[in-house]
Image: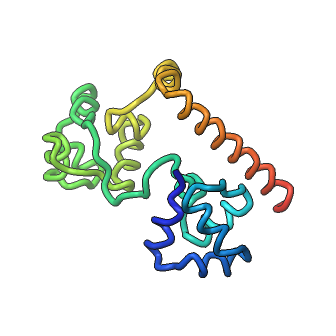
Amino acid sequence: MNKLKQLRKKIGLSQADIAKELNISVKTVSRWENLETDIKPNKAEELAELLGVSVPILLGYGYKEPVKYLVWQDNIANLRKERGISQETLSKDTAIPLTLIKEWESNSGGYTAEQLERLSDYFGVSIPEIIGYSISHSELRDLINALSEESKQKLLAYAKDLKALEDFNKENNP
């Protein structure tokens, strides 16, 4: 499940390079990559730092690496129409090109993080609402309930790893 091998190769490191940097054996790195043993929380943090990613990405959890543009199910038109704002007014007020707003409303463009923040501030809503995405607690509970027992156990193990890492950091980084 971890992404060690993929991330290591992406930045051009060998197993020996990682072993040397973390003061561990090459065999340990190999075992981690082949999922024979788990990466301990303190080593996961060191390894993630070395690879330039977060621990969740290293361990194969959470979001994918950031992208320049985000894809969405557009909600701009709805927000704009609810408030009686024209595309031209939105463009003028936010300094976002009119052509881009038209692309968004025809579902043929993508937002940058800066644009999402600007739109969120302008409409006074959250970024998920801008892109037409929201999830309620009940939906989240339903998603968790739909997971296989194995996936639930992995999620629980990840949560415990995060807690152990948090506790470790609190003790060692006052």
Give x and y (percent) for residue 104: 20, 44
Q: In this view, does 57 lie to the left or right of 117?
A: right
Vertical arrangement, residue 95 with respect to residue 29, above or below: above
Q: Give how far across and how far down residue 36 sits, in percent.
A: 61, 56
Q: Quick one: 103 or 26, which is closer to the camera?
A: 26
Instruction: Where is residue 52? Give x, y as percent.
Output: 55, 69
Question: In terms of depth relative to the viewer, which is nearer, 154 or 123?
Answer: 154
**Left/right of residue 42 with respect to residue 172 in the rendered view:** left
In the picture shown, does residue 5 fall above or below 160? below
| Snapshot colouring | rainbow
In what quadrant of the picture does the C terminus appear?
bottom right
Q: On the image, which quarter does residue 135 sit in? A: top left
Dividing the picture into quadrants, the one containing residue 149 is: top right
In this view, 100 is above or below 49: above
Query: Residue at horizontal 41%, vertical 43%?
Result: 121
Point 29% across, 51% down: residue = 111
Q: Looking at the picture, how far across and down is residue 17, in whole percent?
A: 60, 81
Q: Residue at x 34, y 60 (%)?
A: 68
Q: Residue at x 43, y 37 (%)?
A: 126
In this rendering, would 51 be left or right of 11?
Answer: right
Q: How many labels does the image show?
A: 0
